[in-house]
Amino acid sequence: MRVLGIESSCDETAAAVVRGDRAILANRVLSQIAEHRPYGGIVPEIAARSHLDHIDRLIGEALKEAGVTMAALDGIAVTGGPGLIGGVIVGVMTAKAIALVQDKPLLAVNHLEAHALTARLTDDLPFPYLLLLVTGGHTQLLIVEGVGRYVRLGTTVDDALGEAFDKAAKMLGLDYPGGPLIERAAAQADAAARARFALPRPLLGRPGCDFSFSGLKTALRQAIATLPPGPLASGDVAAIAGAFQDAVTDVLADRTGRAIDLFVARHAQDAARHLVVAGGVAANRALRARLETLAAASGFRLVAPPPALCTDNAAMVAWAGIERLRLGLTDPLDFAPRPRWPLDPAAPPAVGAGVKA
Ligand code: KG4
Ligand code: ZN
């Protein structure tokens, strides 16, 4: 079985071909970061136009690299949402055109499901497992019980964690995307430097597994305001970046620890215990180290797919397509792209402006 995957829901245009035996035959990703950098964040209109400019070429390159013709494909998988709707439309329309002309099944994949199932592509994990998904758009704790079967334990009520890193970086005068630069700056600050700035740990110790990062952002702004005006000294940037990273790491460990308890209570019989961390923020070494300790203390194995498959890509979309195709879960050609698409429709809606799913 060979499936083409197409991804265009955010700021990566991507095309990939994946085989049923988990071989990735091609995985092309074109990042738009340079186009958005002058604005310090993603501009939806720029993203949609850029997807349109590049998507056909990327699909052609992926097929060529995989040595597969369109006629030889078993299905066309595409991110159908959630995401920036202009970009999602570009991908979905492209996938529909190929599916129609080639008479192949269309697989409209939930982008979050694609992230959630990546650990099965990379590590062949059995269901169920616990997933911490931390990207620029999402911060969720989910129990992955099967294809299309998710229990959302927690989500952010405001900013996503990657977004919080990016906003913090902007306040510190660092470039975009800010996560890796915060990590690098934080590595320059020792414990004494970090302790200069007492930042809050939003929702730490509170019931449930939700996240909140907007208060932290405000605290950061206030901390910066105590410093002399003008460009920040590099020592101050390092100290604040370190304090910020410590605060979010504490919060993530607390929330994930609670999710581990809920997972164990729900799946007491299951011997295999896996905690998967995925998304761009999962690249953060301090965060990974903390999760590793947490997982080990609870008898869980931490599984972190390689960064190239953790950040947005089309191999994960193709793989989710394969999982769905095996179950006969294909979609009609009148599938409507979705800006919002919760993985667990039964989860209570989280109130907050930044909630995307
Ligand atoms: O998953 P991703 O590549 O794209 C989506 O948002 O879908 O995640 C990008 C986010 C950005 O906000 C970026 O700042 C953050 O991941 N990020 C990091 C690190 N590397 C990337 N955050 C913290 N530490 C890092 N090392
Ligand atoms: Zn994503």
Image (cartoon, rainbow, N blue to C red):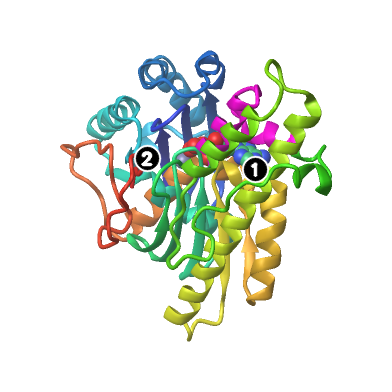
Label 1 amino acid?
Answer: Phe
**Residue drawn at the location 28% of the way across and 28% of the way down:** 89
Residue 277 visible from this viewpoint: yes
Percent x, y for residue 137?
Answer: 44, 39
Crowding at label 1, few (<14), some or many (≥20) Cα neighbours within 10 Å?
A: many
Residue 309 visible from this viewpoint: no
Question: Which residue is label 2 attached to?
Answer: 354
Which residue is outermost to the bottom? 269
What's the magenta bit mostly, secondary-structure-wise? helix
Q: Nearer the viewer, mark 2 or mark 1?
A: 1
From the viewer's side, name the closer residue of 45 and 87: 45
- Is residue 151 inside the magenta stretch? no
**Residue drawn at the location 62% of the way across and 28% of the way down:** 225
Res 146 quadrant in image: bottom left
**Residue drawn at the location 42% of the way across and 79% of the way down:** 266
Question: Which residue is label 1 attached to?
Answer: 244
User: In this picture, which residue range is highlighted in magenta?
Assistant: 162-185
Label 2 amino acid?
Answer: Gly
Percent x, y for residue 325?
Answer: 33, 53
- Secondary structure beneath label 2: loop
From the viewer's side, name the closer residue of 129 and 28: 129
In this rendering, position of residue 283 left or right of residue 127: right
**Residue drawn at the location 81% of the way across and 40% of the way down:** 189
